[in-house]
Amino acid sequence: MNMIKLTSRQAIIEAGFETFSQRPGASLADVAARAGVGRATLHRHFRSRGDLMVALAREAMVELEAAVGAATADAPTYTEGLRLALAAIIPLADRQWFLAHEPVEQDPDIARAYQQDRAELAADIEAAKAEGGFAKDIPTPWIAETYENLIYAAWTLVRNGEATSAQAADLAWRTLTRGLEGGKIDR
Amino acid sequence: MNMIKLTSRQAIIEAGFETFSQRPGASLADVAARAGVGRATLHRHFRSRGDLMVALAREAMVELEAAVGAATADAPTYTEGLRLALAAIIPLADRQWFLAHEPVEQDPDIARAYQQDRAELAADIEAAKAEGGFAKDIPTPWIAETYENLIYAAWTLVRNGEATSAQAADLAWRTLTRGLEGGKIDR
DNA sequence: TATTCATGAGACATATATGTCTCATTTGAG
DNA sequence: CTCAAATGAGACATATATGTCTCATGAATA
């Protein structure tokens, strides 16, 4: 009964990620062209630009949820779960980040889901603190902020061809936990 | 002989920073309104949108240069210089970052200056490595990436009212050097 | 084969941003 | 005070993006 071909809709969403993450001000015509689809077809699937943006945000959150869920399914501790999630998120980073600069949080569903995700991250960090995975005297909001920005840094490194995703994940986790200091503390 | 009032031009540049860092797609009319200036006046100072963007990029780089120069004037070591520069850049972070998503690097001057800045940061990091300030087995590009993203993280923390600029700078430097690990290594 | 349905191409109307221009008013320097 | 320069308001032309609509085509289905 689902008469709408999935391939078209998916091609548009994929093109949306690629186009907007490179150039946030790109036009819908650009997206349609990149998707190999007519402009009218894009509007058949997404009534407006805002609709497309919301769809991209939803898709990004679903992907994140799936990747993190799969990666942490059998993590023995919260700390280890955070390490595995970090590695899993790196390849998805660009699909997440550009949305932060879009007025997409006006959609109440999206806004709620974002807050939910941030609250879960904070809870996981608190749990990891209790395990001794993170220092208890460091504010959780800072740990969360660091966590997210090191993921973005790792993605950038990969994009620039300076490291593989696995190498970048190791660097990010090492930085997050032990820092990059040299000399005496070197180990 | 300088017949152009500084106040107008400066008001427009300031409004440009405020407006575009919040909403990169804002119109020049928005900027003019925020500057308390007519749209025509904006165009008298900046022929086109691209002109304004280039001016913002230049201004941002001058501010950065000045802040870093003043902060590191009498730093005893490269490592200490990087710590002081980090603290000095935090309040300017939003004025720098939004430009990364603008097609402003098409201007050859800007592109050259950006590369210059990145090269200098890399050189300073290498020098700090030689001092023992950073571990020698960590790739310099990763240290640079971490450095910049922790600055952005610190700025975010400050913007959210979770810390003062000085507190955020301490957190960022501690993270960069020693990490956030808890338990046994806690110190 | 006949039919249904998504599609592509493109016309069309509309909205918004951009850049130029004019003119009356204000401001500041001499 | 006087005059030149900067300004604000707004008209104007243009470009681009957006969203709707129509129609012919092609592919999949019944």
Image: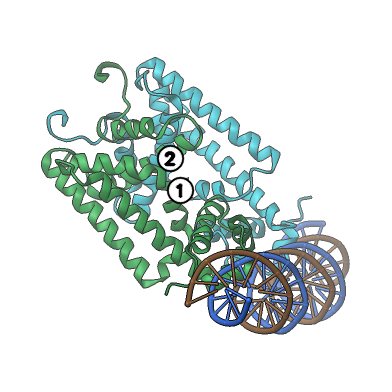
Chain colours: A green, B cyan, C blue, D brown
- Left/right placement of residue C19 relative to residue A153 reads right
Q: Is residue B118 above or below residue B18?
A: above
Q: Is residue B134 above or below residue B1?
A: above
Residue at 58% x, 57% y is A35
Q: Position of residue A75 (x, y in %)?
A: 18, 42
Q: Front-most of A31 and A22? A: A31
Label 2 CA crowd tier, 10 Å (few <14, some 14–19, many 20+): many
Dot 1 or dot 2, earlier in sequence: 1
Q: Is residue B73 above or below residue B109?
A: above
Residue at 70% x, 52% y is B51
Q: Do marks 1 and 2 both belong to one polypeptide chain?
A: yes
Q: Is residue B46 above or below residue C24?
A: above
Chain of the residue under label 1 = A
- Inspect this view and state whether residue B28 appears: no
- Left/right placement of residue D13 relative to residue B162 reads right
Q: Front-most of A121 and C9? A: C9
Q: Quadrant of residue C27?
A: bottom right
In the rendered structure, find residue A13 and report the number of the disc placed on it: none
The answer to whether the residues at label 1 and label 2 have Cβ atoms under 8 Å apart is yes
Q: Position of residue A176 (x, y in %)?
A: 29, 36
Q: Amino acid at mark 2?
A: Trp
Which residue is identified by label 1?
A94
Which residue is identified by label 2?
A155
Number of numbered labels in the structure image: 2
Chain of the residue under label 2 = A
Q: Position of residue A120 (x, y in %)?
A: 23, 55
Q: CA distance from mark 1 to mark 2?
A: 8 Å
**In what element is the residue under mark 2?**
helix
Looking at the rendered image, the quarter that the N terminus of chain A falls into is: bottom left
Label 1 CA crowd tier, 10 Å (few <14, some 14–19, many 20+): many
Residue at 39% x, 48% y is B155
Q: Position of residue B77 (x, y in %)?
A: 40, 21
